[in-house]
Image (tube, rainbow, N blue to C red):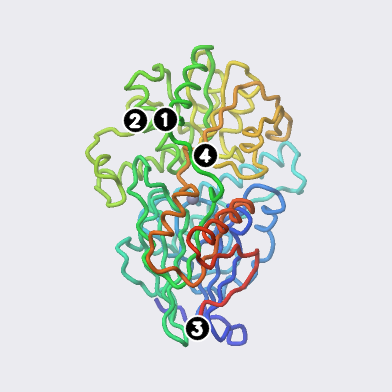
Amino acid sequence: MQTGAMAVPADDRPHAPILTFLGGTGTVTGSRFLVDTPDARVLVDCGMYQGPKELRLRNWEPFPVDPATIDAIVLTHAHVDHCGFVPALTVRGFTGPVYASDNTADLAGIVLPDSGHLQEEEARYANLKGYSKHHPARALYTEADARAALRQLRRMDHGGEVTTVAPGIGVSFRHGGHILGSSIVTMEIDAPGGPRRVTFSGDLGRPNHPLLNPPQPLDGADIVLCESTYGDRVHDDSQALERFADAVRRTAARGGVVVIPAFAVDRTEILLVHLRQLRAGGAIPDIPIFVDSPMALAALDVYQRAITDRDPEIRPEVIEEPDVFGRNEITEVHEVEGSMKLDALRSPAIIISASGMATGGRVLHHLDRYLPDRKASVILVGFQAANTRGRLLADGARQVKLLGRYVRVRAEVVDLPSFSVHADRSELLAWLGADDIPPEVLYVVHGEPGSSASLCQAVIDELDWNAVVPAYGERVRLD
Ligand SMILES: [Zn+2]
């Protein structure tokens, strides 16, 4: 790809390749890793900061380098904390290609416009109700900005072949097993002392994902960046499904509604697979299931297509299953009117709605309605970042602030983090340790501080590797 017009200004170029940690440090959001070489500048992941205000404010700060000087962006997967800032960079002058796997490109085509739309809606609602501290509240980018940014996507295959993305920089993608399309990205950099291999784990999946094949092996690298979302925890899977079924049964027995805030991409699919199996096995009663998220439903279509196309990411046994999501048994809610009707349910039902950490989206209205209801329950099925409503609920908050006012929490709250699609501590260590040759250095990223520190220490103690938790904004040499 000829990107000379966008090259780094000569006076700004390092003499050797440099990596700068622009996000995903001390937090699970805002993943952004900048690689600068004498000839090129490439950003791996371009995530939005979410959660605590001091992090969200970083989305509004000037980008640390002029976006127009970035030759290319490479995305590991379609979650907003990894790709959600792409339209913000294009608005600020980035015009280069954005490389992503085929399935990531399809999912980003859903996620990014939705993110822009959601921001416009939230700004409009905040201005209408007058509760925003910003006057007027505004969106980081609009749906139209996101659609324009999608035109910069370039589709890569997961076969492992190297594609040149900027002068002297090639990348290859392999399955990450975290969500559909998720990739482990290896960058091959021409350096004065010889080529250098840098591998970015992206978010790493679990060996037992019900739909996706396990992550591919690390496969040798000079430098590795590994996520650490669950770097300090081991998932207890043995009880998870049973606890989930119990919570649904209890809620149905008292005539209540189950609200499940779910990440639209992948978590909704996993929930539907489990719900179908639990219903079929009689473990939960036959109550209506509503999927109230146009984005989740669009993502469901992408998963369905991958299964039909026998995509190599999909587990062989899933390909043979005709209706793995039980779509005939669920009600798909696309329109706002249908969503509003769900707040007047008089009998047991399950509502699956985004966003997964209850930071935005339609689920806020359902929480507003059902949190004060003793009969209802809220089941949290994924990682809840610090200071999000999801985390506050998981930690037992008695009130949460929703849509500008405080709501009393009387519903039962059930926290089931082992539904996560992130590898846990032992799975991360197993993935890293399976590689015969240790990297020169492992950077432990994408975790809250305790989690990253804990994984880092385990890698030092158990694998005897050179491992470090980098700081925000830190620059390190890659040569
Ligand atoms: Zn992710």
Q: Where 357 sits versus 285, above or below? A: below
CA separation in Å, label 3 and label 4: 41 Å
CA separation in Å, label 1 and label 3: 50 Å
Secondary structure at badge 1 equals strand
Few, some or many residues within 10 Å of mark 4 (<14, 14–19, 20+): many
Few, some or many residues within 10 Å of mark 2 (<14, 14–19, 20+): some
Q: Where 386 sits versus 257, above or below? A: below
| Residue 283 tag number | none
| Residue 382 tag number | 4
Residue 370 in the image, given as x and y percentages of width and height: 60, 23
Secondary structure at badge 4 equals loop
CA separation in Å, label 4 and label 2: 22 Å
Q: Where 416 sits versus 177, above or below? A: above
**Precedes in sequence: disc 4 or disc 1:** 1
The structure residue drawn at horizontal position 68% and vertical position 34%, both measured from the top left corner, is 403
| Residue 356 visible, this orientation | yes
- Per the image, the residue denoted by label 2 is 327
Left or right, 10 with reference to 154: right
**Precedes in sequence: disc 3 or disc 4:** 3
Viewer-proximal residue among 397 and 360: 397
Left or right, 333 with reference to 12: left
Q: Amino acid at mark 3?
A: Asp
Q: Where 398 sits versus 433, above or below? A: above
- Per the image, the residue denoted by label 1 is 332
Residue 331 in the image, given as x and y percentages of width and height: 41, 26
Viewer-proximal residue among 452 and 118: 452
**Precedes in sequence: disc 4 or disc 2:** 2
| Residue 39 tag number | 3
CA separation in Å, label 1 and label 2: 8 Å
Q: Amino acid at mark 1?
A: Glu
Q: Pointer 1 and pointer 2: residues touching (CB < 8 Å)?
A: yes
